[in-house]
Image (spheres, rainbow, N blue to C red):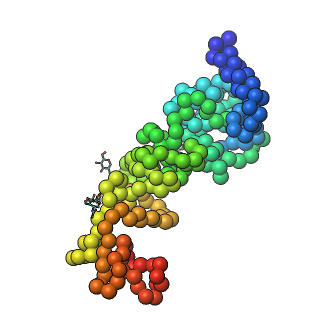
Amino acid sequence: MDPRFWLVIAFFTSWIRARKVDGQCHTTEYSVKGMYLRGHTFKNVQVGLHESCYFKCTEEVTCQSYNFVIGQNICELNNRTKEARPEDFLPDKTRYYMRRLTNRVSLGSIPQLPAESCSEIIASEGGAVEFKKYWIHSDGKNGSIEAYCEGGWQKVNGKDPVCFGTKGNMYGSINITKTGHLRTMKLIHKNGSLHCNSETSPSFWGCTFASYGKNCQQL
Ligand SMILES: *[C@@H]1O[C@H](CO)[C@@H](O)[C@H](O)[C@H]1NC(C)=O
Ligand SMILES: *[C@@H]1O[C@H](CO)[C@@H](O)[C@H](O)[C@H]1NC(C)=O
Ligand SMILES: *[C@@H]1O[C@H](CO)[C@@H](O)[C@H](O)[C@H]1NC(C)=O
Ligand SMILES: *[C@@H]1O[C@H](CO)[C@@H](O)[C@H](O)[C@H]1NC(C)=O
């Protein structure tokens, strides 16, 4: 008998015990019967024992979870978890879903596993993400780039600030490293201010304009 099989049994038994002790069924998961993750399979593997899928998954650095096709004994190795893509987690009586529990690399932490966006990293890894560089899908030829994530926001200008001035049409410029639809954009004031004329008080972004009201400015 494959020694890894016993390892898997020991592993699952200890998991069941751990679950009984803390009694929190929702924090640890085993497998989800009758459900699968659609559209993120990068490899199909035929196996004898369904437990072998777990090892097939751990052999691939990008494997985040897998679907097992009951009856056909096929492991569908996924490069996403159901947490990252809840909309693709769907019912299917012939399959079950299992998340990788050991040595799973976090989404966006390696170039082979770029995230779609910073918010996908938050969804996948659950909660706050560190302010650091992640691999983010960028479309274009290079596929992915390293970009800073701060919460769900992707910084498009890296670490350096964007400078603009009022004199001589000195606008600031940034290169958007992502194609597709831009949902929203946030500017963060770092330092400095500008005057549009001698009467108005200094502002961060531009001139106040009477018809926009007090809270809006013309950029
Ligand atoms: C993830 O798998 C899908 C196929 O389901 C593939 O199109 C995509 O390129 C893969 N992404 C990575 C980062 O390997
Ligand atoms: C793509 O990668 C090459 C080499 O790493 C780099 O010189 C080039 O600027 C990149 N292009 C984009 C659009 O990021
Ligand atoms: C944007 O890209 C252009 C062409 O690659 C480059 O000349 C320019 O310096 C870039 N600007 C910034 C702000 O990175
Ligand atoms: C504003 O910040 C930039 C970059 O950090 C710095 O070079 C510049 O001196 C600062 N200006 C003021 C007025 O503090």
Please report the residue visible at 31 percent of the width from the left and 67 percent of the height from the top: 192
Q: From what the image shows, is residue 198 above or below residue 129? A: below
Q: Quadrant of residue 46?
A: top right
In the picture, the quarter occupied by the C terminus is bottom left
Please report the residue visible at 58 percent of the width from the left and 47 percent of the height from the top: 127
Q: From what the image shows, is residue 87 above or below residue 70? A: below
Q: Is residue 48 visible?
A: no
Along the horizontal axis of the image, is 118 left or right of 202?
A: right
- Residue 203, given in percent of the width and then of the height, sits at 36, 75
Please report the residue visible at 45 percent of the width from the left and 51 percent of the height from the top: 149
Q: If the picture is divided into quarters, which one holds ligand 3? A: bottom left
Q: From what the image shows, is residue 164 above or below residue 95? A: below
Q: Between residues 199 and 103, which one lies in front from this camera angle?
A: 199
Query: Which residue is situated farthest in the top direction here?
Result: 1
Along the horizontal axis of the image, is 80 left or right of 192?
A: right
- Residue 152, given in percent of the width and then of the height, sits at 51, 54
Q: Between residues 80 and 169, which one lies in front from this camera angle?
A: 169
- Residue 131, given in percent of the width and then of the height, sits at 44, 48
- Residue 133, given in percent of the width and then of the height, sits at 41, 46
Q: From what the image shows, is residue 191 above or below residue 15? A: below
Q: Is residue 156 visible?
A: yes
In the picture, the quarter occupied by the N terminus is top right
Along the horizontal axis of the image, is 205 left or right of 72?
A: left
Along the horizontal axis of the image, is 76 left or right of 131?
A: right
Query: Which residue is situated farthest in the bottom direction here?
Result: 211
